[in-house]
Image (cartoon, rainbow, N blue to C red):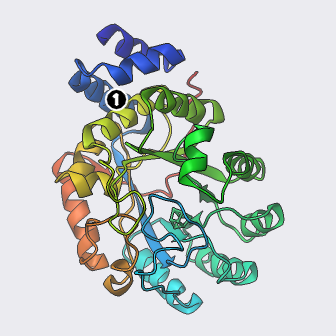
Amino acid sequence: MKTLIDKAAETHSLEYKEILALIKDNSENEYLFKKADEVRKQFVGDEVHLRGLIEFSNVCACNCQYCGLQKDNSKVERYKMTVDEIFETAKKAVENGYKTIVLQSGESKVYSIEELCDLIKRIKQLDVAVTLSIGEKNEAEYRALREAGADRYLLRIETTSFKLYRKLHPDMSLSRRMACLTFLKKIGFEIGTGDLIGLPEQTDESIAEDIMFFKEFEADMIGLGPFIPNPDTPLKNEIGGTFEKALKVMAITRLLIPDANIPATTAMETIRPDGRIIALQSGANVVMPNVNETYYRTKYELYPNKKCVNEDADKCRQCIEEKIKSIGRTIGTSQGFRVRHNAK
Ligand code: SF4
């Protein structure tokens, strides 16, 4: 296994069978995490980019089976922040030092594209990068959002297995998702995507395929987190993913896409104390602290016991900064775009 890990760390290229072997064998996990940390340092340095996350509406028209916000979950108290409220939240985050604002919501039409474009233009005047995580739209809408100034788009695939995707997303299609990603890339967005690890019926084989996809698609940001069953969803009785497996998939991804931005996800912290710090020491270089008011945070529960929902934004920022500095890392001072290094 060490030979395989060294090969990945030096060439940033593995065959499908080799990725699969790495996923299946746990005998050298510590070595894998160490090498992923070294590759992270070599390619993206010691800076940790903080992205200020605004979850601006939990209204959603989709029924992703793993998600607490799915439209069939009647227990969720739905909210929609006003455009002015979103802007004021972004402004406060920028005053607190954030260089990127991430606008995230369920997939819905509760805001018109014109409203979103106006909001993006206002936030761009604050001299920050804007990332959107608002789901599937048509091409004209994507184009309008890009022209309004949005820089990045997050659209997770969760799995590249067509069979599993269909099961988890009864009213959606993986082909359509891939087409969205391809179009977003074509019109100049930096692309973020990612997986949930530990989904029911997910296999090591399909995870290996997912990693191949991230590399072939040249994703700029890859978010990987454990699946945590939500008691108000059809998957409530499933076992869920483990921290170690999610960390491992993240570390392999760092070796193969050395210059990508890889977040230490909140889901990792939810199932393991200091999960984000461990992730930052195993290949990650991004953290996305929530900058919402606590009133809204408690209503955006994709999964249960989500970390930091009761902390206010200032406290959250201070807490994560202290942790980052305690491991000898620094806070990113740029907008944190991917810097390509021409790795194979
Ligand atoms: S994952 Fe996103 S699109 Fe799917 S149900 Fe949850 S909020 Fe809606």
Q: Quadrant of the N terminus?
A: top left
User: At 50% across and 39% down in the image, what residue appears?
Assistant: 260
Q: In this picture, is 231 found above or below 235?
A: below
User: At 26% across and 43% down in the image, what residue appears?
Assistant: 243
In the image: residue 43, left or right of residue 155: left
User: At 25% across and 61% down in the image, what residue appears?
Assistant: 321
Image x and y of residue 137, in percent = 73, 65
Question: What residue is disc 1 on?
Answer: 36
In the image: residue 60, left or right of residue 38: right
Task: Compare residues 196 and 296 and report the one nearer the observer.
Answer: 196
Task: Compare residues 307 and 313 and report the one nearer the observer.
Answer: 307
Image x and y of residue 214, in percent = 56, 36
Image x and y of residue 226, in percent = 35, 48
In the image: residue 54, left or right of residue 216: left
User: At 77% across and 47% down in the image, what residue appears?
Assistant: 186
Structural crowding at the residue carrying mark 1, measured as other residues with C-alpha within 10 Å and reported as few (<14), some (14–19) or many (≥20) = many
- Farthest top residue in view: 3
Image x and y of residue 336, in percent = 49, 53
- Image quarter of residue 35: top left
Q: Is residue 14 visible?
A: no
- Image quarter of residue 316: bottom left
Q: In this picture, is 164 found above or below 77?
A: above
Q: Quadrant of the C terminus?
A: top right
| Total numbered labels placed on residues in the image | 1
Callout 1 amino acid: Ala
Q: Is residue 28 visible?
A: yes
